[in-house]
Amino acid sequence: MSAESRKADQERPPTARVFFALRPPEALVGTLADVARHAAERLGGRPTRCDTIHLTLAFLGDVPVDDLPVLQAIGDSVQCSRFTLRIDRLGYWQHKRLLWAGMSDVVDGLRDLHRQLQGALAASGYRSDSAAHGFAPHITLVRHMPSGGADSKVTGAGNLHPLDWPCSNFFLFKSDLHSSGPDYAILQTYSLA
Ligand code: ATP
Ligand code: MG
């Protein structure tokens, strides 16, 4: 690295990679991590570890560390009721080469939480990725699957015994990326009414 680029790096304000997400109760985390591990053993790819199982509500990416108090307050401004998700299907996205767990029916409570969060972020000048591309709620189970991925023997209805997930809070997470996989840390916890 040249002296100039080192200097430019030092002058850049520190950032954090952040996202809002739901995190399942520990028993459900264990079940989903088991499904992920078994699928990766069978099909290849990197299974999501227990500590990083989540459902993203809004991905902000790298933001200045100085913005974190504002983002924390945005989460506080959301007023939503608790809801229960029924995780009942597996899916595979070829373009991202990932296997995910999701819902046949997306309940209104989750849509409302997503909408409110996006609205509060937009009102403060933040643009999250799912605002641009639509909301596709999912829990990533396996990443970097070999090409070919998962076929209809693995995905679709009937391949996941339905799991009920009572959601009573959501979180602001910080993500640190490593070659072995990301580390997440909870920056803030928010309660649903
Ligand atoms: P890795 O990138 O090492 O595979 P990861 O995807 O779990 O790990 P992050 O990239 O920090 O970690 O992503 C955190 C969450 O935000 C994940 O749910 C991820 O799918 C989502 N996410 C990441 N990048 C984007 C993006 N550009 N648009 C929408 N969501 C994203
Ligand atoms: Mg990623």
Image (spheres, helix red, strand yellow):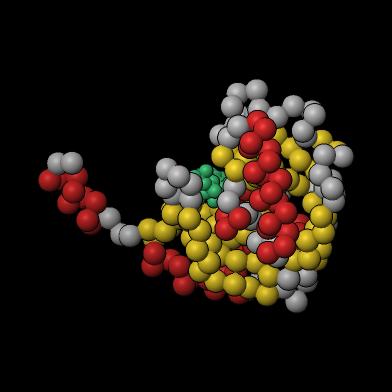
Q: Residue at x 66, y 27 (%)?
A: 149
Q: Nearer the viewer, residue 151 or 108?
A: 151
From this view, report whether residue 159 is shown above or below residue 77: above
Give the residue furthest to the left: 3
Query: Which image quarter is the N terminus in?
Result: top left
Give the residue furthest to the right: 158
Query: Residue 154: percent from the left, percent from the top?
Result: 77, 33
Q: Is residue 180 left or right of residue 22?
A: left
The quadrant where residue 163 appears: bottom right
Q: Residue at x 84, y 48 (%)?
A: 161
| Residue 30 in view (yes/no) | yes
Query: Residue 188: percent from the left, percent from the top?
Result: 55, 71
Q: Is residue 139 left or right of residue 110?
A: left
| Residue 96 in view (yes/no) | no
Query: Which image quarter is the C terminus in?
Result: bottom right
Q: Nearer the viewer, residue 99 or 127?
A: 99
Q: Residue at x 18, y 48 (%)?
A: 6
Give the mark count: 0
Q: Nearer the viewer, residue 42 or 117?
A: 42
Q: Residue at x 70, y 29 (%)?
A: 150
Q: Is residue 61 left or right of residue 64?
A: right
Q: Nearer the viewer, residue 37 or 177?
A: 37
Query: Residue 43: percent from the left, percent from the top?
Result: 65, 31
Query: Residue 76: percent from the left, percent from the top?
Result: 61, 74
The quadrant where residue 11 appears: bottom left
